[in-house]
Amino acid sequence: MRASPRATATFTAAALLAGALAARADYRDSYRKGLEAVDKGNWPEVVRRMQEAAAEQPREGERVKLYGMRFEDYLPHYYLGLGRFQTGDCQGALQAWAASEGQGAVSRSGQYKTLVRNKQACETRLAQARPSPSPDTRPAGPDPTAVAQAVQAAEAQVARAAQLADAVGALASDPDLSRTWASEQALGGAEGQARGALGTARERLDSGRRKPDLAALVEARDLAQGAARQLEGVRREATARREAAARAAEKRLQDELRAANAAPGAGAPPAPLFLAAGAYFEGRYQLAQEMLAGPAALGGRAGAQALLLRAAARHALYLIGGEADDTLKQAALSDVASCRKRDPAFAPDPRFFSPRFRDFFRNGG
């Protein structure tokens, strides 16, 4: 049996609300898909997905749940560099790895040895691609140590600006921003100026490395630094606008949920129901269970929905715990029985609940 149209509308709104509340969690989905592409050796997809993840959450080090009990370190810059390395873009790989090493989390991970090995391979490739001085001529020009330091400083600024450009590029495709991005000076206009400066910085960096030319390297550093400042401003402005749009969408969805769930004359349902739905769809099952500690106090369909949601949260905790806590299983079964008693026609919607939980609900364990 399926839920009634009104119940389905309520959970549709709850799921959409959960998406609005969890907009910042999208990077985890991009990261999971990027790791799947690593497993398959689909390196262009790795680059795309890791750019998405890094744009949404550039800070590395978090432990991200992939599925079941598998957790992985969140290292999007490292994997972005790996994808670029595998597709032959050594310059881009080194920039991504510099961003990763600068944060420190990768150095404590099992991937660090691979990073160091591939980084050395990339540096060797780039060195071999540069023209060698004639063996019978003595190098002339500025002090090699000063040049090396200037190259390092310019490369660091170019890498930082490139990272910000990736982040801004991902924001430009956001549905809430893309319609007006190009026409907004604070967004598309400023982004275009910064990308132009970054392109010039890269040209001056390449030129300064070839000669070598300290003035060109300093110019490259300053141009990239200015581009990074401008891109950071664009990112802050875009993020603020997106968050404002998300708050407006959240309010609309809350209104939709209240309208869908309220019986004639009964008023709006309590806030814990849609807040717990948001926690559940984010994977925060313990919090969802705690927020629904007293569903018996909710009347009508809201009570049945709360019992169903709590049963699903407890069932998820039972599975995550290796199916070892029989108390959780029995509590989930009790919630299922109470839900059926409240509304015999109510059942988990397949759009929002796993096949395993739907079998649990249907067959009583």
Image (cartoon, rainbow, N blue to C red):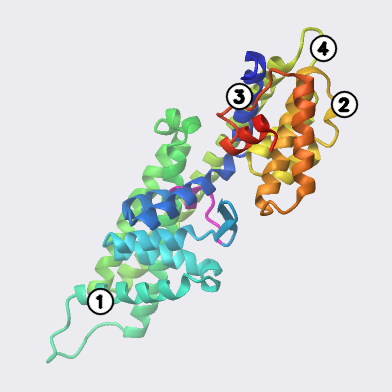
Q: Would you say residue 147 sits in the magenta stretch? A: no
Mark linked to residue 266 = 4
The image quadrant of residue 262 is top right
In whole angstroms, how far apart are the C-alphas of marks 4 and 2?
Answer: 14 Å
Q: Please report the bounds of the magenta region as a residue range.
A: 52-60
Mark 1 residue type: Ala
Secondary structure beneath dot 1 equals helix
* Quarter of the image where the C terminus is located: top right
In this view, the mark in front (4 or 2): 2
Secondary structure beneath dot 4 equals loop
Q: Point out the tag, 1 or 3, that comes first from the N-terminus.
A: 3
Q: Residue at x 52, y 39 (%)?
A: 238
In this view, the mark in front (2 or 1): 2
Q: Residue at x 35, y 53 (%)?
A: 197
In whole angstroms, how far apart are the C-alphas of marks 4 and 3?
Answer: 21 Å
According to the image, label 2 marks what residue? 297
**Front in this rendered view, residue 210 or 165:** 165
Secondary structure beneath dot 2 equals helix
According to the image, label 1 marks what residue? 127
Q: What is the residue that sits farthest to the top in this orientation?
A: 264
In whole angstroms, how far apart are the C-alphas of marks 3 and 2?
Answer: 23 Å
In this view, the mark in front (3 or 2): 2
Q: Position of residue 11 (x, y in %)?
A: 64, 25
